[in-house]
Image: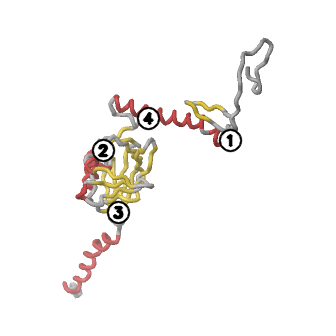
Amino acid sequence: MAKQRPLPSTLAVLPLLLLLGALPLALSHAAPRTAVAGGGDAMADTIHELLRTHGLPGGLLPRGVESYSLDEANGLLEARLSAPCYAKYDDGDLAFFDTVVRGNLSFGALRGVEGLSQEELFVWLPVKGIVVADPGSGVILFDIGYAHKRLSRSLFEEPPDCKPSASAGTDAADAARWKDRQGGIKSHAQFSSLNLFPFVTGRCSWPEVQGRGTRRRKPPGPEVKRSYRKCNEGEIQTEDRQC
């Protein structure tokens, strides 16, 4: 009768069990952690809460965010919208959001922003960073490249609606003002091209602007006194002979 092999003791198997149990934990620490959320209004509320937990107002991003991802290793936040859109805040400022808005998220700051622009004096300027330096001051700073714009934090507490055009969703008065602003840009460009271009090219000398046109005039020189009389029949009036 064959002898049965002795079963391994518990002490001999214990190191192998510990190794297998620690392997998933080691793999989870080695891989970068990324939080991903799906679409819908619930997910949009989630990203707004995410901003609030990082010391930023939740209204920095509009409603209608379809999904977002946060890489916890480097803080890269990416929010995806269904299409580019415009949002209007309570102070009347317009903001443009691209399909993907990204930036490096840290407590009280969103730096290296891409996909967000604000209108300043009829010009769209890219927002490069958003910082809440002093939470108690109620002020939020927007880095628009050449300057830092200081705004009230309360303007961005609630996420705004995002519309496909800058004038969509506004009342009649705001839409008319937006149309006038666009017309003002076009009129200003036309006036500049008509009146300023000749000065640059040198086609006009000694220009004198009156109203919307230009006319030539002679360079300043010694004053010449002239006497004038009524032209007789057959006389021709010239520049040197005035009658």
- Residue at mark 4: 181
- Residue at mark 2: 63
Q: Is residue 52 left or right of residue 124?
A: left
Disc 1 to disc 3, C-alpha distance:
55 Å
Closest to the observer, 233 or 92: 233
Report helix, strand or loop for mark 2.
Answer: loop
Disc 4 to disc 1, C-alpha distance:
31 Å
Does label 1 or label 3 sit earlier along the sequence? 3
- Whether residue 113 is visible, yes or no, is no
Q: Residue 115 at what x, y percent from top left?
A: 42, 50
Does label 4 or label 2 sit earlier along the sequence? 2
**Location of the C terminus (image quadrant):** top right
Does label 3 or label 4 sit earlier along the sequence? 3
Q: Amino acid at mark 1?
A: Gly
Disc 3 to disc 2, C-alpha distance:
22 Å
- Residue at mark 3: 75
Q: Residue furthest top?
A: 233
Disc 4 to disc 2, C-alpha distance:
26 Å
Closest to the observer, 156 or 151: 151
Closest to the observer, 153 or 51: 153
- Residue at mark 1: 202
Report helix, strand or loop for mark 3.
Answer: loop
Is there CB contact under 8 Å for labels 1 and 3? no
Does label 3 or label 2 sit earlier along the sequence? 2
